[in-house]
Image (tube, rainbow, N blue to C red):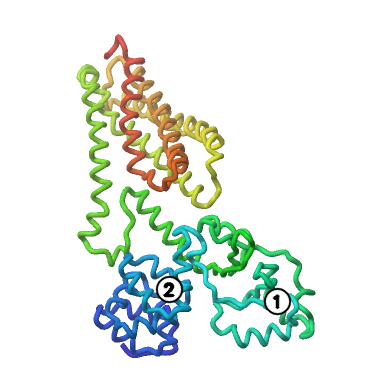
Amino acid sequence: MEQNSALHPADIAEEISRLSKGEQHQEFMDYPLEDRLEIFSFFEMDVQYTLIKSMTEHELSELLNNLKPDTRNELLSELPDDLIKYLINLLNEREKQMALELIGYKEDSIARLMTPMYVQVRPYYTVDDVFRHIKVFGRKAETLNFIYVVDEKNVLIDDLKIGQLLLSDSSTKISDLIDYNFAAIKASTPMEEAFEIFQKYDRSALPIITEAGVLVGIVTFDDVLDRIEDRDTEDIQRFGGMEELDLAYTKTPLLQLIQKRAGWLIILFFSEMLTASAMGFFEGELEKAVVLALFVPLIISSGGNSGSQAASLIIRAMALGELKLKDWWYVMKREVSSGLILGGILGSIGFLRILAWHFLGLYDYGPYWISIGFTVAVSLLFIVLWGTLSGSFIPFILRRFGLDPATASAPFVATLVDVSGLIIYFTVAAFFLHGKLL
Protein backbone atom coordinates (compact mmCIF):
# COMPACT_ATOMS: atom_id res chain seq x y z
CA MET A 1 0.00 0.00 0.00
CA GLU A 2 1.43 3.34 -1.05
CA GLN A 3 1.84 5.77 1.84
CA ASN A 4 -0.14 8.98 1.63
CA SER A 5 0.82 11.58 4.21
CA ALA A 6 -2.17 13.71 3.18
CA LEU A 7 -4.60 11.13 4.58
CA HIS A 8 -6.04 11.53 8.05
CA PRO A 9 -4.68 8.96 10.56
CA ALA A 10 -8.18 7.47 10.84
CA ASP A 11 -8.24 6.82 7.09
CA ILE A 12 -4.77 5.30 7.17
CA ALA A 13 -5.84 3.04 10.05
CA GLU A 14 -8.86 1.92 8.03
CA GLU A 15 -6.70 1.07 5.01
CA ILE A 16 -4.16 -0.87 7.08
CA SER A 17 -7.00 -2.79 8.78
CA ARG A 18 -8.07 -4.17 5.40
CA LEU A 19 -4.67 -5.80 4.85
CA SER A 20 -3.73 -9.32 5.90
CA LYS A 21 -2.24 -9.73 9.38
CA GLY A 22 1.28 -10.07 8.03
CA GLU A 23 0.95 -7.00 5.84
CA GLN A 24 -0.57 -4.93 8.65
CA HIS A 25 2.63 -5.03 10.70
CA GLN A 26 4.90 -4.26 7.76
CA GLU A 27 2.78 -1.35 6.54
CA PHE A 28 2.32 0.08 10.04
CA MET A 29 6.05 0.04 10.82
CA ASP A 30 6.84 1.86 7.56
CA TYR A 31 5.39 5.06 9.03
CA PRO A 32 7.46 7.37 11.27
CA LEU A 33 6.90 6.96 15.02
CA GLU A 34 4.93 10.19 15.35
CA ASP A 35 2.51 9.02 12.66
CA ARG A 36 2.30 5.50 14.11
CA LEU A 37 1.17 6.90 17.45
CA GLU A 38 -1.73 8.73 15.82
CA ILE A 39 -2.68 5.84 13.55
CA PHE A 40 -2.59 3.27 16.37
CA SER A 41 -5.21 5.16 18.38
CA PHE A 42 -7.71 4.75 15.51
CA PHE A 43 -7.37 0.98 15.15
CA GLU A 44 -10.09 -1.35 16.42
CA MET A 45 -9.05 -3.46 19.40
CA ASP A 46 -8.56 -6.62 17.33
CA VAL A 47 -6.10 -4.87 14.98
CA GLN A 48 -4.20 -3.36 17.92
CA TYR A 49 -3.93 -6.83 19.45
CA THR A 50 -2.68 -8.31 16.17
CA LEU A 51 -0.01 -5.63 15.83
CA ILE A 52 1.15 -6.07 19.42
CA LYS A 53 1.65 -9.80 18.89
CA SER A 54 3.63 -9.19 15.70
CA MET A 55 5.97 -6.48 17.06
CA THR A 56 9.44 -7.04 18.44
CA GLU A 57 10.17 -6.09 22.04
CA HIS A 58 11.98 -2.94 20.90
CA GLU A 59 9.09 -1.90 18.63
CA LEU A 60 6.59 -2.46 21.42
CA SER A 61 8.63 -0.52 23.96
CA GLU A 62 9.00 2.42 21.61
CA LEU A 63 5.28 2.48 20.85
CA LEU A 64 4.01 2.05 24.41
CA ASN A 65 6.35 4.60 25.96
CA ASN A 66 5.15 7.25 23.52
CA LEU A 67 1.43 6.50 23.37
CA LYS A 68 -0.92 8.93 25.07
CA PRO A 69 -1.63 7.61 28.59
CA ASP A 70 -5.39 7.34 28.04
CA THR A 71 -4.94 5.45 24.75
CA ARG A 72 -2.41 3.12 26.36
CA ASN A 73 -4.63 2.52 29.39
CA GLU A 74 -7.63 1.73 27.21
CA LEU A 75 -5.51 -0.84 25.38
CA LEU A 76 -4.13 -2.42 28.56
CA SER A 77 -7.57 -2.69 30.16
CA GLU A 78 -8.73 -4.98 27.32
CA LEU A 79 -5.78 -7.39 27.39
CA PRO A 80 -5.17 -10.61 29.40
CA ASP A 81 -3.38 -10.14 32.76
CA ASP A 82 -0.19 -11.94 31.70
CA LEU A 83 0.15 -9.74 28.61
CA ILE A 84 -0.53 -6.59 30.66
CA LYS A 85 2.36 -7.46 33.00
CA TYR A 86 4.66 -8.08 30.06
CA LEU A 87 3.80 -4.78 28.38
CA ILE A 88 4.04 -2.73 31.58
CA ASN A 89 7.55 -4.07 32.14
CA LEU A 90 8.51 -2.57 28.76
CA LEU A 91 7.70 0.93 30.03
CA ASN A 92 10.24 3.29 31.53
CA GLU A 93 9.82 4.16 35.21
CA ARG A 94 7.83 7.35 34.62
CA GLU A 95 5.41 5.78 32.16
CA LYS A 96 5.13 2.61 34.25
CA GLN A 97 4.11 4.61 37.33
CA MET A 98 1.55 6.50 35.25
CA ALA A 99 0.10 3.31 33.75
CA LEU A 100 -0.16 1.51 37.09
CA GLU A 101 -1.88 4.52 38.64
CA LEU A 102 -4.54 4.60 35.91
CA ILE A 103 -5.11 0.83 35.95
CA GLY A 104 -5.52 1.02 39.74
CA TYR A 105 -8.86 2.80 39.43
CA LYS A 106 -12.13 0.85 39.29
CA GLU A 107 -12.90 -0.53 35.85
CA ASP A 108 -16.08 1.50 35.39
CA SER A 109 -14.72 4.76 36.85
CA ILE A 110 -14.07 7.79 34.68
CA ALA A 111 -10.47 7.89 35.95
CA ARG A 112 -9.74 4.90 33.69
CA LEU A 113 -10.13 7.23 30.70
CA MET A 114 -8.23 10.24 32.00
CA THR A 115 -4.87 11.51 30.86
CA PRO A 116 -2.32 13.42 32.95
CA MET A 117 -1.30 15.34 29.84
CA TYR A 118 -2.73 18.83 30.36
CA VAL A 119 -1.52 22.35 31.09
CA GLN A 120 -1.85 23.72 34.61
CA VAL A 121 -0.80 27.13 35.92
CA ARG A 122 -0.78 29.11 39.16
CA PRO A 123 -2.94 32.17 40.01
CA TYR A 124 0.08 34.48 40.19
CA TYR A 125 1.03 33.80 36.54
CA THR A 126 0.45 36.57 34.05
CA VAL A 127 -1.15 35.83 30.68
CA ASP A 128 2.28 36.21 29.11
CA ASP A 129 3.69 33.66 31.60
CA VAL A 130 0.94 31.23 30.64
CA PHE A 131 1.73 31.39 26.93
CA ARG A 132 5.43 30.84 27.60
CA HIS A 133 4.44 27.90 29.80
CA ILE A 134 2.26 26.48 27.01
CA LYS A 135 5.14 26.67 24.52
CA VAL A 136 7.26 24.56 26.86
CA PHE A 137 4.71 22.02 28.16
CA GLY A 138 1.78 22.24 25.75
CA ARG A 139 3.13 20.08 22.95
CA LYS A 140 2.15 16.81 24.65
CA ALA A 141 -1.10 18.10 26.15
CA GLU A 142 -4.28 16.25 25.18
CA THR A 143 -6.03 19.57 24.56
CA LEU A 144 -5.22 23.26 24.84
CA ASN A 145 -8.84 24.39 24.83
CA PHE A 146 -8.70 24.73 28.61
CA ILE A 147 -5.94 25.78 30.99
CA TYR A 148 -6.29 24.58 34.58
CA VAL A 149 -5.49 26.81 37.56
CA VAL A 150 -4.28 25.09 40.75
CA ASP A 151 -2.98 26.26 44.13
CA GLU A 152 0.24 25.23 45.86
CA LYS A 153 -1.37 21.91 46.94
CA ASN A 154 -2.48 21.17 43.37
CA VAL A 155 -6.12 21.74 44.30
CA LEU A 156 -8.14 22.85 41.29
CA ILE A 157 -9.26 26.47 41.56
CA ASP A 158 -10.67 27.15 38.11
CA ASP A 159 -10.34 26.40 34.43
CA LEU A 160 -9.91 29.04 31.75
CA LYS A 161 -10.74 28.83 28.08
CA ILE A 162 -7.83 29.61 25.82
CA GLY A 163 -10.00 32.29 24.20
CA GLN A 164 -10.14 34.20 27.49
CA LEU A 165 -6.36 34.35 27.56
CA LEU A 166 -6.04 35.36 23.92
CA LEU A 167 -8.38 38.30 24.49
CA SER A 168 -6.69 39.45 27.72
CA ASP A 169 -3.79 41.85 28.12
CA SER A 170 -0.44 40.07 28.41
CA SER A 171 0.24 41.62 31.83
CA THR A 172 -3.09 40.51 33.32
CA LYS A 173 -2.73 38.10 36.22
CA ILE A 174 -4.60 34.81 36.16
CA SER A 175 -6.02 35.64 39.60
CA ASP A 176 -7.88 38.53 37.96
CA LEU A 177 -9.50 36.22 35.39
CA ILE A 178 -10.69 33.36 37.57
CA ASP A 179 -14.17 33.30 39.10
CA TYR A 180 -13.93 29.92 40.91
CA ASN A 181 -16.87 28.69 38.83
CA PHE A 182 -15.92 25.45 37.11
CA ALA A 183 -17.17 21.91 36.43
CA ALA A 184 -15.13 18.88 37.48
CA ILE A 185 -15.62 15.13 37.86
CA LYS A 186 -14.43 13.05 40.81
CA ALA A 187 -12.09 10.21 39.87
CA SER A 188 -14.45 7.57 41.31
CA THR A 189 -17.44 8.73 39.24
CA PRO A 190 -18.93 5.97 37.03
CA MET A 191 -18.57 6.58 33.30
CA GLU A 192 -22.32 6.85 32.75
CA GLU A 193 -22.61 9.67 35.28
CA ALA A 194 -19.57 11.37 33.77
CA PHE A 195 -21.24 11.25 30.36
CA GLU A 196 -24.27 13.05 31.83
CA ILE A 197 -21.98 15.74 33.26
CA PHE A 198 -20.39 16.24 29.85
CA GLN A 199 -23.83 16.64 28.31
CA LYS A 200 -24.95 19.04 31.02
CA TYR A 201 -21.99 21.41 30.72
CA ASP A 202 -21.34 20.90 26.98
CA ARG A 203 -17.55 20.75 27.41
CA SER A 204 -14.96 19.16 25.15
CA ALA A 205 -12.85 18.28 28.21
CA LEU A 206 -13.39 18.15 31.97
CA PRO A 207 -10.89 17.96 34.85
CA ILE A 208 -10.72 14.89 37.10
CA ILE A 209 -10.22 15.55 40.81
CA THR A 210 -9.82 13.51 43.99
CA GLU A 211 -12.22 13.72 46.93
CA ALA A 212 -10.00 16.51 48.29
CA GLY A 213 -10.24 18.46 45.05
CA VAL A 214 -6.70 17.71 43.85
CA LEU A 215 -6.37 17.78 40.06
CA VAL A 216 -5.15 14.39 38.80
CA GLY A 217 -6.04 14.46 35.10
CA ILE A 218 -8.52 15.40 32.43
CA VAL A 219 -10.93 13.47 30.22
CA THR A 220 -11.93 14.52 26.73
CA PHE A 221 -15.44 14.04 25.40
CA ASP A 222 -14.36 11.89 22.46
CA ASP A 223 -12.83 9.31 24.82
CA VAL A 224 -16.02 9.16 26.88
CA LEU A 225 -18.14 8.91 23.74
CA ASP A 226 -16.08 5.96 22.47
CA ARG A 227 -16.58 4.11 25.74
CA ILE A 228 -20.30 4.88 25.86
CA GLU A 229 -20.62 3.55 22.31
CA ASP A 230 -18.87 0.32 23.36
CA ARG A 231 -21.18 0.03 26.37
CA ASP A 232 -24.30 0.58 24.27
CA THR A 233 -23.14 -2.12 21.84
CA GLU A 234 -22.71 -4.55 24.74
CA ASP A 235 -26.14 -3.62 26.13
CA ILE A 236 -27.83 -4.23 22.77
CA GLN A 237 -26.15 -7.63 22.45
CA ARG A 238 -27.14 -8.63 25.98
CA PHE A 239 -30.67 -7.37 25.42
CA GLY A 240 -30.86 -9.60 22.36
CA GLY A 241 -30.17 -12.59 24.59
CA MET A 242 -26.45 -13.21 24.13
CA GLU A 243 -23.08 -12.41 25.65
CA GLU A 244 -21.33 -9.31 24.35
CA LEU A 245 -18.76 -9.84 21.58
CA ASP A 246 -15.12 -9.06 22.35
CA LEU A 247 -14.42 -8.07 18.74
CA ALA A 248 -16.39 -6.57 15.88
CA TYR A 249 -19.00 -8.94 14.40
CA THR A 250 -17.07 -9.31 11.14
CA LYS A 251 -13.84 -10.13 13.03
CA THR A 252 -15.37 -12.62 15.49
CA PRO A 253 -14.56 -16.29 14.63
CA LEU A 254 -17.60 -18.45 13.85
CA LEU A 255 -17.05 -20.81 16.79
CA GLN A 256 -16.75 -17.91 19.22
CA LEU A 257 -19.92 -16.36 17.77
CA ILE A 258 -21.77 -19.64 18.35
CA GLN A 259 -20.35 -19.90 21.87
CA LYS A 260 -21.53 -16.39 22.75
CA ARG A 261 -25.05 -17.11 21.51
CA ALA A 262 -25.53 -20.71 22.60
CA GLY A 263 -25.58 -20.11 26.37
CA TRP A 264 -28.58 -17.82 26.41
CA LEU A 265 -30.39 -19.87 23.74
CA ILE A 266 -30.07 -23.02 25.87
CA ILE A 267 -31.29 -21.19 28.98
CA LEU A 268 -34.24 -19.74 27.05
CA PHE A 269 -34.98 -23.14 25.51
CA PHE A 270 -35.31 -24.73 28.94
CA SER A 271 -37.40 -21.76 30.05
CA GLU A 272 -39.73 -22.26 27.10
CA MET A 273 -40.23 -25.83 28.29
CA LEU A 274 -42.31 -24.25 31.04
CA THR A 275 -44.60 -22.97 28.29
CA ALA A 276 -44.99 -26.51 27.00
CA SER A 277 -45.67 -27.70 30.56
CA ALA A 278 -48.32 -25.01 30.99
CA MET A 279 -49.96 -26.11 27.74
CA GLY A 280 -49.94 -29.69 29.01
CA PHE A 281 -51.53 -28.62 32.29
CA PHE A 282 -54.46 -27.13 30.39
CA GLU A 283 -54.71 -30.04 27.96
CA GLY A 284 -58.16 -30.94 29.26
CA GLU A 285 -59.50 -27.47 28.54
CA LEU A 286 -58.01 -27.58 25.04
CA GLU A 287 -59.69 -30.93 24.32
CA LYS A 288 -63.07 -29.52 25.36
CA ALA A 289 -62.64 -26.21 23.55
CA VAL A 290 -60.21 -26.67 20.65
CA VAL A 291 -61.04 -23.15 19.50
CA LEU A 292 -58.97 -21.78 22.40
CA ALA A 293 -55.81 -23.17 20.80
CA LEU A 294 -56.30 -20.90 17.80
CA PHE A 295 -55.56 -17.82 19.88
CA VAL A 296 -52.61 -19.10 21.92
CA PRO A 297 -49.94 -17.65 19.53
CA LEU A 298 -51.83 -14.34 19.43
CA ILE A 299 -52.16 -14.14 23.20
CA ILE A 300 -48.61 -15.02 24.21
CA SER A 301 -46.94 -12.97 21.46
CA SER A 302 -48.89 -9.86 22.50
CA GLY A 303 -47.73 -10.25 26.09
CA GLY A 304 -44.12 -10.87 25.07
CA ASN A 305 -44.09 -7.93 22.67
CA SER A 306 -45.52 -5.52 25.23
CA GLY A 307 -42.98 -6.72 27.82
CA SER A 308 -40.06 -6.31 25.43
CA GLN A 309 -41.25 -2.82 24.49
CA ALA A 310 -41.48 -1.74 28.12
CA ALA A 311 -38.09 -3.26 29.00
CA SER A 312 -36.46 -1.47 26.04
CA LEU A 313 -37.86 1.90 27.13
CA ILE A 314 -36.87 1.52 30.78
CA ILE A 315 -33.38 0.17 30.10
CA ARG A 316 -32.64 3.01 27.68
CA ALA A 317 -33.98 5.60 30.13
CA MET A 318 -31.75 4.12 32.84
CA ALA A 319 -28.72 4.21 30.55
CA LEU A 320 -29.34 7.89 29.80
CA GLY A 321 -29.76 8.70 33.49
CA GLU A 322 -33.42 9.67 33.06
CA LEU A 323 -34.57 7.05 35.58
CA LYS A 324 -33.12 6.13 38.96
CA LEU A 325 -34.06 3.35 41.39
CA LYS A 326 -36.24 5.76 43.35
CA ASP A 327 -38.41 6.31 40.26
CA TRP A 328 -39.82 2.78 40.28
CA TRP A 329 -43.23 3.78 41.66
CA TYR A 330 -43.56 6.62 39.14
CA VAL A 331 -42.80 4.15 36.34
CA MET A 332 -45.27 1.58 37.68
CA LYS A 333 -48.09 4.15 37.75
CA ARG A 334 -47.36 5.20 34.17
CA GLU A 335 -47.06 1.62 32.95
CA VAL A 336 -50.34 0.57 34.58
CA SER A 337 -52.08 3.26 32.54
CA SER A 338 -50.12 2.36 29.40
CA GLY A 339 -50.75 -1.35 29.85
CA LEU A 340 -54.49 -0.91 30.37
CA ILE A 341 -54.87 1.35 27.34
CA LEU A 342 -52.70 -0.80 25.07
CA GLY A 343 -54.38 -3.97 26.33
CA GLY A 344 -57.78 -2.39 25.75
CA ILE A 345 -56.83 -1.49 22.18
CA LEU A 346 -55.55 -4.99 21.36
CA GLY A 347 -58.46 -6.61 23.19
CA SER A 348 -60.95 -4.58 21.16
CA ILE A 349 -59.22 -5.54 17.92
CA GLY A 350 -59.25 -9.20 18.99
CA PHE A 351 -62.97 -9.08 19.78
CA LEU A 352 -63.78 -7.32 16.48
CA ARG A 353 -61.73 -9.92 14.60
CA ILE A 354 -63.81 -12.77 16.05
CA LEU A 355 -67.00 -10.80 15.36
CA ALA A 356 -66.02 -10.16 11.73
CA TRP A 357 -64.86 -13.72 11.02
CA HIS A 358 -68.06 -15.12 12.56
CA PHE A 359 -70.52 -12.98 10.61
CA LEU A 360 -68.53 -13.13 7.36
CA GLY A 361 -68.61 -16.91 7.60
CA LEU A 362 -64.82 -17.22 7.59
CA TYR A 363 -64.91 -19.36 10.74
CA ASP A 364 -67.70 -20.88 12.79
CA TYR A 365 -67.08 -20.18 16.47
CA GLY A 366 -70.37 -21.81 17.43
CA PRO A 367 -73.17 -20.48 19.62
CA TYR A 368 -70.79 -19.17 22.25
CA TRP A 369 -68.84 -16.87 19.95
CA ILE A 370 -69.53 -13.84 22.15
CA SER A 371 -68.07 -15.62 25.20
CA ILE A 372 -65.03 -16.61 23.12
CA GLY A 373 -64.68 -13.01 21.99
CA PHE A 374 -64.79 -11.73 25.57
CA THR A 375 -62.29 -14.42 26.60
CA VAL A 376 -59.79 -13.23 24.00
CA ALA A 377 -60.43 -9.53 24.65
CA VAL A 378 -60.13 -9.70 28.44
CA SER A 379 -57.14 -12.05 28.22
CA LEU A 380 -55.34 -9.58 25.95
CA LEU A 381 -56.15 -6.74 28.36
CA PHE A 382 -54.64 -8.53 31.36
CA ILE A 383 -51.73 -10.15 29.51
CA VAL A 384 -50.59 -6.89 27.89
CA LEU A 385 -50.90 -5.17 31.28
CA TRP A 386 -48.88 -7.96 32.91
CA GLY A 387 -46.26 -7.91 30.13
CA THR A 388 -45.89 -4.14 30.38
CA LEU A 389 -45.48 -4.23 34.16
CA SER A 390 -43.04 -7.17 34.02
CA GLY A 391 -40.90 -5.61 31.31
CA SER A 392 -40.69 -2.29 33.13
CA PHE A 393 -40.13 -3.69 36.63
CA ILE A 394 -37.49 -6.35 35.94
CA PRO A 395 -34.77 -3.75 35.07
CA PHE A 396 -35.38 -2.07 38.45
CA ILE A 397 -35.00 -5.39 40.27
CA LEU A 398 -31.73 -6.13 38.46
CA ARG A 399 -30.39 -2.62 39.16
CA ARG A 400 -31.39 -2.99 42.84
CA PHE A 401 -29.19 -6.10 43.14
CA GLY A 402 -26.27 -4.48 41.32
CA LEU A 403 -26.81 -6.30 38.02
CA ASP A 404 -26.88 -4.81 34.55
CA PRO A 405 -30.51 -4.01 33.56
CA ALA A 406 -29.62 -4.88 29.96
CA THR A 407 -29.61 -8.53 30.99
CA ALA A 408 -33.41 -8.22 31.14
CA SER A 409 -33.18 -9.23 27.51
CA ALA A 410 -36.13 -9.25 25.15
CA PRO A 411 -36.13 -13.08 24.90
CA PHE A 412 -36.01 -13.40 28.71
CA VAL A 413 -38.95 -11.05 29.25
CA ALA A 414 -40.90 -12.68 26.43
CA THR A 415 -40.34 -16.16 27.87
CA LEU A 416 -41.49 -15.07 31.33
CA VAL A 417 -44.64 -13.49 29.93
CA ASP A 418 -45.32 -16.50 27.66
CA VAL A 419 -45.66 -18.87 30.62
CA SER A 420 -47.65 -16.52 32.83
CA GLY A 421 -49.74 -15.42 29.84
CA LEU A 422 -51.02 -18.94 29.28
CA ILE A 423 -52.11 -19.15 32.90
CA ILE A 424 -53.97 -15.84 32.57
CA TYR A 425 -55.57 -16.90 29.28
CA PHE A 426 -56.95 -20.20 30.52
CA THR A 427 -58.06 -18.67 33.83
CA VAL A 428 -60.08 -16.05 31.94
CA ALA A 429 -61.42 -18.78 29.62
CA ALA A 430 -62.58 -20.81 32.60
CA PHE A 431 -64.48 -17.75 33.88
CA PHE A 432 -66.29 -16.92 30.62
CA LEU A 433 -66.76 -20.43 29.23
CA HIS A 434 -67.55 -22.37 32.42
CA GLY A 435 -70.68 -24.42 31.86
CA LYS A 436 -70.57 -23.68 28.13
CA LEU A 437 -67.50 -25.10 26.42
CA LEU A 438 -65.61 -25.97 29.63
Q: Is residue 38 visible?
A: no
Disc 2 crowd, CA 10 A, few/some/many (<14, 14-19, 20+): many
Q: Is residue 304 left or right of residue 155?
A: left
Residue drawn at x 30%, y 14% as measured from the top left: 367
Q: Amino acid at mark 1?
A: Arg
**Quadrant hosting residue 391:** top left
Q: Which residue, as the protein is rendered here, is positioned at the far top?
A: 435
78 or 35, which lies in front?
A: 78
Q: Position of residue 63 (x, y in %)?
A: 39, 82
Disc 1 crowd, CA 10 A, few/some/many (<14, 14-19, 20+): some
SS label for mark 2: helix
Residue drawn at x 66%, y 67% as measured from the top left: 155
When the figure is inspected, residue 117 is found, relative to residue 196, above or below; the finding is below
Q: Is residue 66 left or right of residue 131?
A: left
Looking at marks 2 and 1 on the same chain, the residue that comes earlier in the sequence is marked by: 2
**Quadrant hosting residue 199:** bottom right
143 or 318, which lies in front?
A: 143
Q: How many marks?
A: 2
Q: Position of residue 113 (x, y in %)?
A: 49, 66
When the figure is inspected, residue 172 is found, relative to residue 430, above or below; the finding is below
SS label for mark 1: loop
**Which label belongs to residue 381?**
none
CB contact under 8 Å: marks 2 and 1: no
Q: Position of residue 153 (x, y in %)?
A: 66, 70
72 or 394, which lies in front?
A: 72
- Per the model, the C-alpha gap separating discs 2 and 1 is 29 Å
**Which label belongs to residue 72?**
2
In the rendered image, which residue does mark 1 sit on?
122
> Which corner quadrant holds the N terminus?
bottom left
Q: Position of residue 326 (x, y in %)?
A: 56, 39
Q: Amino acid at mark 2?
A: Arg
